[in-house]
Structure formats: C-alpha cells, structure tokens
Image (cartoon, rainbow, N blue to C red):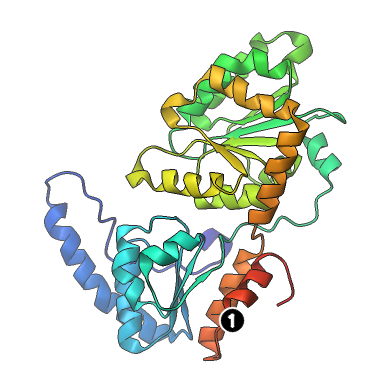
Amino acid sequence: MPEAGIPLRRLLLRSLRSAGRDIHLVLDPLRLLLSVPQALLLLIARRPAAILTTGGYVAIPVLAAAALLRIPSVLWEGNVVPGRSVRVVARLASVVAVSFPETATALAHPRTLVTGTPIREAGVIDPDEARAVFGAVPGERILLVFGGSQAVRRFNEAVSGALLRLVERVRVVHVTGDDGYEAALAAREALPEALRDRYRPYPFLHAEMTAALDAADLAVGRAGSSTLAEAAAFALPMVVVPYPHAGGHQRRNAEAYAASGAATLVDDADFTADRLVELAGLLADPAAHARMSAAARDAARPHAADAVADLVVALAQRSALPTQAQIDAVARGGSR
C-alpha cells in the first residue's frame, strides 16, 4: 500500500489465531485492548466522515472506536459463512454489505444489503486480442487453471498428470505459483514439440489476469469470493475446487455459486488428473457450456465496487441509503 501512495497505519494487535501455548496467548488479548485507544486516537486525528472495513481481526478495535465516536461504518463480508470477528463486530457497523444473500440471514443485521464482491476493473477488452496473448487461434478452446495462494500443489499435480491428454484437445493456461513453475516448465519441454505451445505455465498472472479471464472458455479455481465474482463478470463457466481448510468457508461459497448453475463443484480430495480431463470435456459440449455461461452472466455483479462505494458515500453525507433495488441496478451495471 505505501508503494502505491496509500497511507498505512498499523495497530498494535496481530492475528488472533495463535495456535500454540506461548507468550502470545497472554499478549494477544493485551494487544487487542491497547488497540482500541490507539484506534480512537487515529480516528480523532483523521476525523473520517465514514469507515469501510472488510472485517478480520483488525476491524474489532476500529469499529469499537468508531461506535464510541459515532462515526458511521460499512462492514463488507464476502463469504457465505461470516468469520468470527465479523460476527462479533457486525452489530457495531452502521450498514453491512454482503456478497451472498445467505450471509444476510446469518448476520441478522437490520441494515444488510447484497452488493456482490468488488473486483478489478475489467475495462474494454477485445476477446480476440485477449486470446492472442496466450497464442490461441480462432476456434481453439482455452482452459485456465489457477489455484490461488492456498494449496496450489493439488492443482499442479492434476495438471501434470493430465497434461498430454489436455493439450491434445485444448490450450492450457496454468498459474503454478513460484514453487510449481520450474516443474511446469520441465513438463512443457517433455511434450511433443507440436503440442508444446498449447501449454502456457506462469508463476503468477498480474496485469495479464484480466486477459486470461476474458480469453478462457473454462476456469478451474478455488472458491474465494473474488475468484467467483471475477469468473461471473466474464460469464466464464467454472470448476470450483474449494480449499478444504480455513473453517470450510470456501465450501459454502462453492455450494452457493454452483447452485446458480454457473459452476461444477469438485471436492479437493477428488480433484485428480483423470477428473480434470473429464471436466474439461465440457468444452466439447456447446449446449452445456452455453447454459453455464448464461448462468454465470446472470449471477454477475461486475460493478459491486460502485455499489459498496454508494453505501459509504451515503453514510458520509448522512443521506438516505440506497435501496436493495438501486444497489442491484448499480452492481449489475445499470445507472446510478
């Protein structure tokens, strides 16, 4: 954030997820208590008109201080199952914004609005230009595989075991992470020369990720809120493999999204090379692919960031909050 020119102030507290019995079991509660007056002083100094928080442990002292100072706040939660800290501080927020309707029921806050998940600006991208970035020719199908930052090894092993069978049918864009990139390059070199270009591994995709989402015909990924929202924004059918840990939050996200018809849910333990080849068969079924793409388009809220911003501005200006219908129109790309 500082490198991007955004001022950053740290509170004393650290993560409240201490696993061992050590000095932090004593220090963490103390840090949390001391962070409340620290947050008070920061807010008194800055006098913000409104606060936006995405939850997490850092929201506890900030929203407690904001409530004491009567500063209005928006709490955004992207998962179907809200985290523990969100459940604790939701009552302190003036408004709660969520990505899934099920979350509104779980939090039972009187002022909850479904905005969707804020994502990067897609901009105007020519699909043919996006596909050309990854070497695709007209009519060639692209499979995008990206495991995110958590447990990417499962995805890398599945791609490795299925690689020859995949590139015989489709072009594969594979985000491996740093640890898997060298092995992916070796696997590419082991392919027959005529097929080698159909496998494009990358350690990470940064600016090119938007082009990858626009170019792909099918994505395989985890079930983080942002991942699902970005796939929907590009009407991109997905195979969703939820991360099996972290309280099972991704599982509930995946179930809710798959219920829309835009994705197929596969358990992490079942995601093998053979299963990946089977799932890639969707690219040979135009009717099924079109149905999933249409479902993703219906689920999309590509302008969720604008919808959340409208809530923050309304609180800052002490004006009436937008209605759910107005939020829906903005988030889906209608007029503000």
Residue with the mark numbered 1: 322
Which residue sits furthest bottom? 318
Residue at 38% x, 74% y is 109
Residue at 66% x, 13% y is 164
Q: Is 214 left, or right, of 219 in this rendering?
A: right
Residue 322 is drawn in which quadrant?
bottom right
Q: Position of residue 293 (x, y in %)?
A: 71, 44
Q: Is 190 left, or right, of 150 in this rendering?
A: right
244 up-or-down from 313: above or below: above
Q: Where is residue 52 in the image (x, y as percent from the top left)?
A: 47, 73
Q: Return the residue nearer the eye: 200 or 23.
A: 200
Q: Return the residue nearer the eye: 304 or 182.
A: 304
Does residue 183 appear in the picture of this structure? no
Mark 1, secondary structure of its residue: loop
Residue 140 is drawn in which quadrant?
top right
172 up-or-down from 234: above or below: above
Question: What type is the residue that disc 1 sits on?
Answer: Pro
